[in-house]
Image (tube, rainbow, N blue to C red):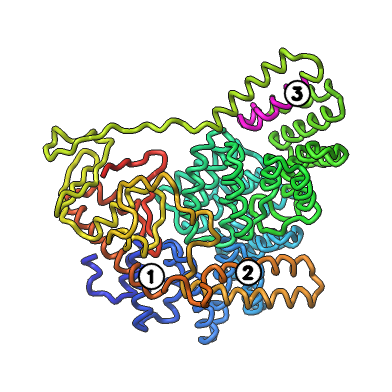
Amino acid sequence: MDDDAGLGLVERARSAAARGGWQQAFDLLMQADADGLLAGTDLPLLGEVAYPAGHLDVTIEAWERAHAAGMQAGDQVAAAGAAVRVALHLLFDTALMAPVRGWLARAERLLEGRGQTPTHAWFAAVRAYERMLTGDLPGAGQWARQAIEVGAKCDPAASAIGQVAQARLLILDGDVQQGLALLDQAGVATVAGDLDPLSTGVVYCELVCALQGLAQYDVAEQWTEVMERWCETNAIGSLRGRCRVHRAEILRLRGSCHEAERQVLMACEELRPHLRRELGWPLNELGRIRLHKANIAGAEEALLAAHRAGWDPQPGLALVRLAQGDAATAAASIRDALERPSWVPSKERPPNTDLQRAPLLEAQVQIEIAAGAIGRARSAADELELVAARFQSKAFVAGAAHARGRVRLADGDAAGAKQSLSEAVRLWNEVDAPYEAALARMSLAEAHTAAGSEHRAVLERQAARTILEGIQTAPPTATPAPVEHRDTPEEQPAASVNVFRRDGDYWSVIFDGHTVHVRDLKGMRYLAILLADPGREYHVLDLVAAETGHGIQAGSGHAANLPRSALGDAGEILDARAKDAYRRRLTEIDDDIEQAHATGDTDRAAQADIERGFLIRELAHAFGLSGRGRRAASASERARSAVTRAVRQAIARIGKHHPKLDQHLSRTIRTGTYCVYLPDPRAPAGWEF
């Protein structure tokens, strides 16, 4: 920092960004902006810095302002580039497709007749995903090819993202082997490290989404591990949280549902500052995990929260109704989901595709049999077999075999049921999916009973119950023995136990076996609160309240219950900037609806209308009955600045005598409007207070 002391705010911010100091760079740029020192040409830097610093609304607003500045300066390519960046963040972080279309239309007009530039490549890549996530697969294919061709000449990152889009489209068209080969090529090229962090993370995340949607779980797990290793030092913005959701999906499949739930709750907290509507994705995964754990009430809570966020809660919510004993409502729900497919832009299961229908069909077989509609169940099983044959996924084939076995059992064909269900058990075991294998075993036990082989039924039932009980029973929590604190080294706890304890006017801090004593500061109190609740995000106003004794205290055990904000809409409140952004999005959506009606595009109008409803609910949530905001934005901003400064001062004070702890805290403490301690979940640093 001393080398930057003589530079201006923007130059110091640029220097901080170059060494990865995103929050420092963001604070400097915001100060420069408030002082009127941020030129139009500096706005792209603010957009690039705000995203990794965790400020999505500022990111989008900065690129919107950069677009306006480019237009004012007569630089149409720069204005188009900024418009594409607005569309990119709206696409990947809000899942609001109507505003994406509006910003892409602006960029398209500005780029017309201007040859091939990196902006053209990025425009094509974003357009490809916009088309895919609105169900226009042929149109998406054309834009993906253009992104690859133009990007190969001038922007490898755009070309790589276009390649992933093309691979996904090949898979959706039934050319699975070529699509998987292309995905593998894109992943291997990304591992080489030639792309910027944002593009690298997008490629990794989209690659895993494609594999998860196709139920290629073994390959998805391998790439999730690659993405996790990359995330340890390179993740920015929402990428770490997205990676955590993918890990939770794999853990659920492998039967580690308690760890999966912990991971996805942490992901909800990490993603809340970044995502809006797409927060429904991890909430939907949370519902699936809780269903596996037989936590029906918890699953319902998560799935309804996903629905409030504008996400499709099916088939999970229909299965919840079945588990609650309401087969009629479950059947009506699953039929409606199939007859009126959702237009939610899921990246794992794009709308208007067989991948979207597959889990619905699998659930329908079970639900219709329970409701006594065997004919509907039979039709669903027939369609599911066709989907499984098309996509050549062992997991899809296993699900189809289980569905066929259930139908045969309901038809009284015990022998045929045993054949299909035995095949389902074998395939699910090969996939290493114990929960699904256990359900297939329970069905197989019923088939054995129907065939008069009760001894075999008992064996299958016992095996299934043992597996399910292992998944559903919470692992024992070890209570650590109290450790008496001493100042002398020989009495210190083992190196694996860290201490952050206040003794009068000083804090005794032990980390990695080394002790330091630090004078009491506000920042030390903030750190204690964060360290006591790993993974929990605190709004800065809540931190201030806690530090002054009006909130939760460090070491109180509150971390055992993660905040209910993880199950909210898009967060506890919206500040003034977010509210203004939502109003702009509403205007853009209204324009999109008007254009859709003018062209007779009813599907587009329906999708945009759903998005409009989501934003209206968000704005209603942000205001009280009087129409005033639920929290004063000015107070929030003052608290953010004060807390960030205090925490940094405390870490710097610790670092003078304990550089290793300085490095650990600098890497794992995230500050901003929401502050959080995010240790590596596979090697958590436990703290005593």
Disc 1: CA contacts within 10 A as few (<14), some (14-19) or many (>=20): some
Nearest the eye: 591 or 150: 591
Mark 2 or 3: the one toward you: 3
Residue 495: x percent and y percent?
Answer: 24, 35
Amino acid type at circle 2 is Val
Magenta-colored span: 428-448
Element marked by disc 1: helix
Nearest the eye: 215 or 405: 405
Amino acid type at circle 1 is Ser
Which of the labelled discs sits on residue 446, or is there none? 3
Is residue 195 visible to us here?
no
> What secondary structure predominates along the stretch shown in magenta?
helix
* Residue ID for mark 2: 100
Which of the labelled discs sits on residue 636, or is there none? 1
For residue 115, above or below residue 442: below
Amino acid type at circle 3 is Glu
Residue 42: x percent and y percent?
Answer: 42, 76
> Dots 1 and 2: beta carbons under 8 Å?
no
Disc 2: CA contacts within 10 A as few (<14), some (14-19) or many (>=20): many
Residue 16 found in image quarter: bottom left
Is 446 inside the magenta-drawn segment?
Answer: yes
Nearest the eye: 446 or 339: 446
Q: Is residue 565 left or right of residue 656?
A: right
